[in-house]
Image (spheres, rainbow, N blue to C red):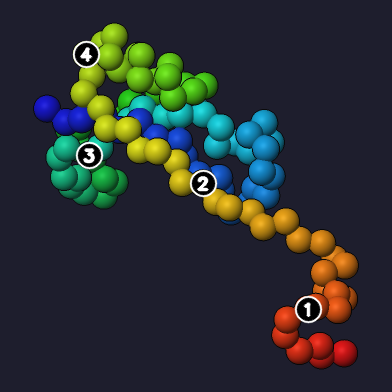
Amino acid sequence: MTRAKIYRPSKTSMQSGRKATVSRGNEWVLEYPRSSSVQPDVLMGWQSSADTKRQVRLRFPNRETAIAYAEAHHIAYDLAEPKTRRVKPKAYADNFAYKRRGSWTH
């Protein structure tokens, strides 16, 4: 039996906000990985598969709710923690600082 994956999707490249309310990636997803290979359909040439679990994608507001749902329905799952980035605060005045490293080109 395949294990479900619980993860928080990353922001798209078109999103620049750092707040969770601004970005669309503030929800957690439970989905199943592909368990069988896909074959092209004979008539249309589209991809087809007998795997119906791949079509299931459940969204949850937080990680605890997703884990509680999986445990209540006896779903084996793998939890993928989101990667966080460290933002270095910068100011425009730092470009003109006396202790600035690097050469000044103007």
- Look at mark 2 in the image and give the residue it sits on: 84
Q: Nearer the viewer, mark 1 or mark 3?
A: 1
Gap between marks 2 and 4, in whole Å? 30 Å
Q: Crowding near pointer 2: few (<14 within 10 Å), some, many (20+)? A: few
Q: Is residue 63 visible?
A: yes
Q: Is residue 94 above or below residue 39?
A: below
- Look at mark 3 in the image and give the residue it sits on: 34
- Look at mark 1 in the image and give the residue it sits on: 100
Gap between marks 1 and 3, in whole Å? 52 Å
Observer-nearest residue: 76 or 91? 91
Percent coordinates x, y for residue 62 in the rendering? 49, 23
Gap between marks 3 and 2, in whole Å? 27 Å
Q: Nearer the viewer, mark 4 or mark 3?
A: 4
Who's the residue at 73% across and 81% down the image? 101
Percent coordinates x, y for residue 51 in the rendering? 20, 32
| Label 2 vs 4, first from the N-terminus | 4
Q: Tag 4's secondary structure?
A: loop
Observer-nearest residue: 9 or 83? 83
Q: Is residue 43 visible?
A: no
- Asked if residue 93 lies left or right of residue 87, the reply is right
Residue lying at the far top in this picture: please name it.
72
| Label 3 vs 2, first from the N-terminus | 3
Q: Tag 2's secondary structure?
A: loop
- Asked if residue 16 lies left or right of residue 37, the reply is right
- The kind of residue tagged 3 is Arg
- The kind of residue tagged 1 is Arg
Percent coordinates x, y for residue 81 in the rendering? 40, 38
